[in-house]
Image (cartoon, rainbow, N blue to C red):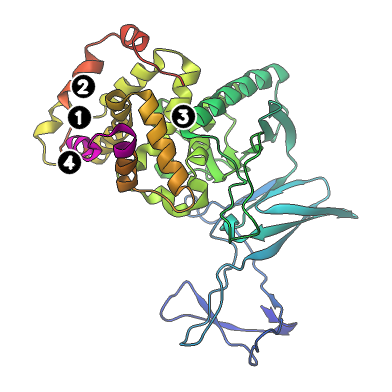
């Protein structure tokens, strides 16, 4: 480390071992400017310990875990901001690489065999990330919904057309059910004025992970089985509100269904706060339910019933006599809870209540009380009683199980509105 070009040493904090305490050589006076330079060697840890991924021709530095963060000084009159309102990120890579980062890209320049990319980071970016490498790029999607696909190898043009149509349909479904999403939704006071969403949807990036496995979290893998995506495997994860890391090895034709969970989390605003992923049941299953909505729209009229039956099989029939659901049953029951809300209140009230909750809490997160309040307002009924019926007792309510186990999928689907 260097402070204004001079070597600076740090000591491990005795109170917080993850922190390093820096002793500055002099007093940092008000309005003065200094330069702190920190050089690090980033290495891939043992498998499962880190999401840092390096290949000979690409690398991925995810949000959190690699970028140093300056904490305010301790003391009665100490001041400081974490993070600052605005800062710069500079990336140097080989000339034939392409780079995608958080923030707003402001300049690209090439000198000799090196490419330099400069981006402006803002407080709403939360944590910086960098993806770079010798990727093959292809723009898919539509005029109103641009999607940039980055893969290590070129993909068949016919397959890309099919996946483009599927992705556009999936995103249209999310817009219909959860409201139109826009990365331009920056709360006023953070950075400049609030900007209204554009008529066109913001672009999305789907980028192949440099090294598999390693880019995808275990918790998301467990949820993938609820919607039948590659059994219990995981093939996508949200990097930021506009970027999804993917595994194209199952085949590009399965890309739409494979990315559905990550894209759903984007529409729910989860990328604005890492804490959104730490919800308790039933909201912990909200992203995978949203993904199922997209998959059901792609797969046809009977898909909704098939999805529900798949999850019902994970909840034992005799669990009502048990004291507590196990982890698998609780996860499946939380997932089914949102289908039960659709059945009880109808698709239109469900849409309005979910949008009400998301619009009101998009920049600050939401919890079960917010969900109950939204359904109370839109339905004019007591939603708390229905929530208690589902979540305070083990197992699945008998009438819900009987409805989907004893009715043919074709008949049930024909009497239900399954797409927006």
Q: Secondary structure at mark 2?
A: helix
Q: Earlier in the sequence, mark 2 or mark 3?
A: 3
Q: CA distance from mark 2 to mark 3?
A: 25 Å
Residue 84 image point, x, y percent: 61, 68
Front disc: 3 or 1: 3
Label disc, if present, on residue 396 of the rendered structure: 1
Q: From the viewer's side, name the closer residue of 93 and 46.
A: 93
Q: Are marks 4 and 1 in contact (CB under 8 Å)?
A: no
Q: Earlier in the sequence, mark 1 or mark 2?
A: 1
Please give the range of residues in magenta. Answer: 375-390
Label disc, if present, on residue 134 of the rendered structure: none
Residue indicated by mark 2? 401
Q: Residue at x 53, y 36 (%)?
A: 263
Label disc, if present, on residue 392 of the rendered structure: 4
Residue indicated by mark 3? 177
Residue 262 image point, x, y percent: 51, 37
Query: Which of the 4 image quarters holds residue 163?
Result: top right
Above-or-below relation of 346 to 104: above
Q: CA distance from mark 4 to mark 1?
A: 11 Å
Q: From the viewer's side, name the closer residue of 309 and 250.
A: 309
Q: Earlier in the sequence, mark 2 or mark 4?
A: 4
Above-or-below relation of 417 to 324: above
Q: Residue at x 44, y 42 (%)?
A: 358
Query: Which of the 4 image quarters holds residue 2?
Result: bottom right
Front disc: 4 or 3: 3
Q: Furthest-bottom residue in view?
A: 26
Above-or-below relation of 189 to 156: below
Q: Furthest-right residue in view?
A: 112
Q: Earlier in the sequence, mark 3 or mark 1?
A: 3
């Amino acid at each position: 480390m260097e402070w204004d070009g001079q070597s600076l040493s740090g000591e491990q904090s005795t109170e917080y071992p993850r922190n390093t305490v820096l002793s500055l050589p002099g007093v940092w006076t008000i309005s003065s400017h200094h330069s702190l330079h920190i050089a690090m060697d980033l290495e891939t840890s043992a498998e499962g310990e880190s999401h840092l991924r390096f290949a000979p021709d690409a690398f991925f530095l995810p949000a959190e875990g690699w970028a140093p963060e300056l904490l305010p000084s301790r003391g009665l009159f100490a001041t400081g901001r974490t993070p600052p309102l605005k800062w710069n990120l500079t990336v140097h890579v080989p000339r034939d690489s392409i780079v995608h980062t958080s923030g707003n890209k402001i300049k690209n320049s090439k000198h000799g065999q090196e490419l330099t990319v400069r981006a402006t980071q803002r407080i709403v970016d939360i944590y910086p990330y960098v993806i770079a490498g010798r990727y093959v790029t292809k723009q898919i999607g539509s005029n109103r919904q641009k999607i940039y696909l980055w893969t290590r190898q070129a993909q068949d043009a016919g397959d890309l057309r099919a996946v483009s149509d599927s992705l556009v349909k999936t995103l249209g479904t999310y817009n219909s059910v959860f409201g139109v999403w826009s990365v331009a939704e920056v709360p006023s006071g953070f950075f400049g004025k609030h900007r209204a969403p554009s008529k066109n949807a913001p672009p999305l990036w789907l980028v192949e992970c440099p090294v598999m496995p390693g880019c995808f979290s275990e918790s998301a893998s467990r949820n993938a089985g609820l919607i039948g995506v590659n059994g219990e495997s995981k093939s996508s994860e949200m990097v930021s509100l506009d970027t999804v890391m993917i595994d194209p090895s199952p085949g590009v034709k399965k890309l739409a269904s494979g990315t559905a969970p990550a894209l759903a989390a984007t529409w729910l605003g989860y990328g604005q706060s890492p804490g959104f992923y730490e919800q308790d049941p039933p909201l912990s299953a909200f992203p995978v339910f949203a993904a199922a909505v997209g998959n059901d729209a792609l797969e046809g009229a009977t898909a909704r019933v098939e999805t529900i039956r798949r999850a019902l099989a994970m909840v034992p029939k005799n669990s009502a006599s048990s004291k507590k659901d196990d982890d698998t049953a609780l996860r499946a029951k939380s997932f089914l809870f949102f289908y039960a809300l659709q059945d009880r209140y109808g698709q239109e009230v469900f849409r309005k209540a979910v949008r009400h909750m998301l619009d009101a809490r998009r920049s600050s997160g939401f919890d079960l009380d917010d969900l109950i309040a939204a359904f109370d307002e839109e339905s004019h009924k007591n939603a708390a009683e229905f929530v208690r019926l589902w979540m305070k007792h083990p197992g699945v309510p008998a009438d819900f199980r009987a409805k989907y186990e004893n009715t043919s999928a074709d008949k049930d689907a024909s009497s239900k509105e399954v797409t927006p």
